[in-house]
Image (cartoon, grey):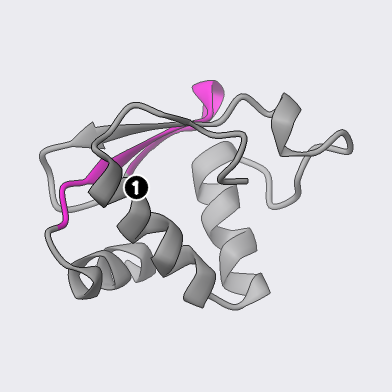
Amino acid sequence: LQKYTRVDIDFPIASLLWSSLEKLSNEDRAIFLWNWTGSDKMAAEGAKVMGLRLSSTRGPNFIAHTCFKTLDVPNCRTQEEMDTAVLI
């Protein structure tokens, strides 16, 4: 997923997000993916064809644009902040 996602945000924020997602159970990752893309499963061809994108937001919460498979990521400063944001 990480390898095939277009990242339009600062590296530290993206790194915090990937670390937070690694801590989730498979079930919670599926829920996160569903909120991001509108599907809880990967495309049969894999993440490469899904066209996922990360962008930034100034707000405290994620904003998903499922039609465009874009996720606006909050500007968290610490791993703890990102872990909390991912679970909300």
Residue receiving disc 1: 14
Picture coordinates of residue 55 (x, y %)?
A: 32, 31
- Residue 75 falls within the magenta-colored stretch: yes
Q: Report which quarter residue 73 is drawn in.
A: top left
In the rendered image, the vertical position of residue 27 relative to residue 69, given as above or below: below
Q: Nearer the viewer, residue 80 or 43?
A: 80
Q: Amino acid at mark 1?
A: Ala
Picture coordinates of residue 74 (x, y %)?
A: 21, 47
Looking at the image, residue 27 sits to the left or right of residue 5; the answer is right
Residue under the point 16% across and 56% down: 76
Q: How many marks?
A: 1
Residue under the point 57% across and 71% down: 28
Residue under the point 54% across and 23% down: 67
- Residue 67 falls within the magenta-colored stretch: yes
Helix, strand or loop at label 1? It is helix
Furthest-right residue in this view: 44
In the rendered image, the vertical position of residue 23 relative to residue 29, given as above or below: below
Picture coordinates of residue 64 (x, y %)?
A: 40, 38
Residue under the point 44% across and 57% down: 18
Which residues make up the magenta segment? 63-76
